[in-house]
């Protein structure tokens, strides 16, 4: 061990990404195994929970869930630990699937120079060649297998600074076991701790939302603002099929991936918010809603798909002349469609009443009159009364929608979606509970 190292040089930031595959594996699972390995070495201090960092969900080359992991530890000899971690990872990495391209990165000292990369990777497409230059500038050591596709996520994760955050307790199942969560038990727990949890139950469809559907080792993940509450729920759901578990601090449920832009500024794969006037709307085949949003720089096609549930129902009630802010991901244009904003969140800012001019009511019999032509007056179809003195009436029709923020049904939430339960909330829990993994 080097006694000449100052305190900041004994801090090691570790980033991991793309240890999963479409049908198996999980980067968080590798991270938990790495945590257990580090604790066996001894004399290592974890400076925070492991960070589960979700990045721009619209990138086509993303890993599953587009999530990366960052660990921050304190140890007297970081270079020794780097070699030990690299050797350990080489033994457990799984390269059976051709799309798996795992990476571990190491940054000694404060990772302040990577914060801008994190911000950009949240909201835009980041070319890998730029990331290599950043890694070289910041003296980051890279250990990767097969293409290093996970480099962007791994570097962005250790550069993350979470001004808002939530927690997720991830439990992992024993190999070969099935996931089984009773809906009514979970619902009761979710209602009991509703002030501290989110996104765990879909009450409309009576669905459990904490269990994934793939072949990965995750049994379930409970999301909320207080790790102590998550641990209480975990103990009530725990079964003999759970192999290990850990609590992660995360940017999930914070809505931090959206960047306000003008229509002329958007680029493919951006996560943006566009404010403008609805100038056209139609319902597509299957119930998808399409509308055009106009601002001072141009017009952008927007889509609210049927799968978004409640948000799609709101979309059916949208009308021209409404002023809204639509947030979501930009789908590139093609030969069949223009560049489109796939709406994830909708903020209705201003609703004007719909103005309709109606023919006058006959003063004799009360029936609706008919126009005789320009400046020729009106005639009653029922009693024959004619007059040039009666005028059309103005009828105002008000939308049943109100100004406010509208979200999809919980089953359609993306990892970064800010749920209504968290509106106005600020993070308040920042100490490591004991135990935080097991």
Image (tube, rainbow, N blue to C red):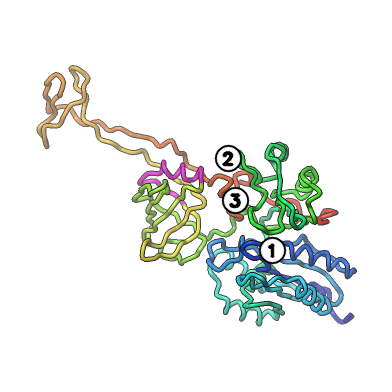
Q: Which is in the foreground here, disc 3 or disc 2?
A: 2
**Number of numbered labels in the structure image:** 3
Crowding at dot 3, Cα within 10 Å, few <14 / some 14-19 / many 20+, comes out as many
Which dot, 3 or 1, sits closer to the camera?
1
Of residues 285 and 12, the one nearer the viewer is: 285
Give the left or right position of residue 305, taking residue 367 as reference: right
60 w.r.t. 295: above or below:
below
Q: Secondary structure at mark 2?
A: loop
Give coordinates of residue 398: x percent, y percent.
38, 35
Residue 416 occupies which quadrant of the picture? bottom right
Q: Position of residue 272 (x, y in %)?
A: 50, 59
**Residue at which label 3 appears:** 418
Instruction: Check contact, mark 3 vs mark 1: CB within 8 A.
Output: no
Q: Going by the image, does 190 lie left or right of 413?
A: right
Residue furthest left as drawn: 376
Quadrant containing the C terminus is bottom right
Highlighted range, magenta: 309-325
Q: Alpha-carbon distance for marks 1 and 2?
A: 29 Å
Q: For residue 238, which numbered disc appears in the image?
A: none
Along the line of sight, the residue nearer the viewer: 208 or 70: 208
Query: Which residue is under mark 1?
Result: 25
């Amino acid at each position: 061990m080097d006694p000449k190292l100052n305190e900041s040089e004994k801090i090691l930031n570790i980033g991991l990404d793309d240890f999963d595959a479409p049908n198996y594996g999980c980067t968080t699972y590798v991270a938990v195994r790495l945590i257990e390995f580090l604790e066996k070495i001894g004399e290592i201090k974890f400076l925070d929970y492991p960070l589960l960092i979700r990045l721009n969900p619209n990138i086509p080359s993303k890993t599953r869930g587009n999530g990366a992991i960052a660990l921050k530890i304190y140890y007297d000899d970081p270079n020794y630990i780097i070699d030990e971690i690299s050797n350990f990872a080489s033994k457990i990495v799984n390269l059976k699937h051709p799309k798996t391209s795992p990476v571990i990165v190491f940054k000694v000292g404060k990772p302040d120079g990577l914060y801008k990369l994190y911000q950009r990777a949240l909201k835009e497409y980041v070319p890998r060649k730029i990331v290599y230059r950043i890694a070289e500038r910041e003296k980051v050591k890279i250990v990767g297998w097969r293409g290093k596709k996970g480099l962007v996520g791994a570097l962005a994760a250790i550069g993350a600074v979470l001004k808002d955050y939530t927690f997720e307790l991830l439990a992992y199942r024993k190999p070969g076991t099935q996931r089984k969560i009773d809906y009514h038990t979970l619902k009761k727990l979710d209602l009991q701790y509703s002030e501290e949890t989110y996104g765990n139950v879909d009450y409309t469809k009576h669905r459990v939302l904490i269990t994934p559907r793939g072949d990965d080792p995750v049994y379930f993940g409970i999301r909320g603002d207080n790790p102590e509450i998550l641990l209480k729920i975990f103990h009530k759901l725990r079964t003999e099929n759970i192999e290990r578990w850990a609590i992660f601090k995360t940017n999930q449920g914070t809505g931090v991936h959206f960047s306000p832009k003008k229509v002329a500024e958007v680029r493919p794969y951006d996560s943006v918010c566009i404010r403008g006037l609805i100038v056209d709307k139609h319902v597509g085949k299957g119930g998808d809603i399409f509308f055009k949003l106009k601002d001072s720089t141009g017009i952008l096609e927007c889509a609210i798909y049927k799968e978004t549930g409640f948000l799609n129902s709101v979309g059916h009630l949208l009308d021209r002349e409404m002023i809204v802010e639509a947030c979501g991901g930009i789908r590139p244009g093609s030969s069949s469609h223009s560049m489109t904003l796939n709406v994830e969140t909708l903020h209705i800012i201003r609703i004007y009443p719909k103005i309709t001019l109606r023919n006058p009511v006959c003063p004799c019999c009360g029936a609706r009159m008919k126009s005789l032509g320009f400046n020729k007056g009106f005639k009653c179809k029922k009693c024959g009364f004619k007059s040039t003195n009666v005028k059309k009436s103005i009828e105002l029709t008000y939308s049943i929608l109100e100004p406010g923020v509208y979200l999809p049904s919980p089953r359609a939430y993306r990892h970064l979606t800010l749920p209504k339960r968290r509106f106005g909330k600020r993070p308040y829990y920042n100490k490591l509970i004991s135990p935080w993994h097991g």
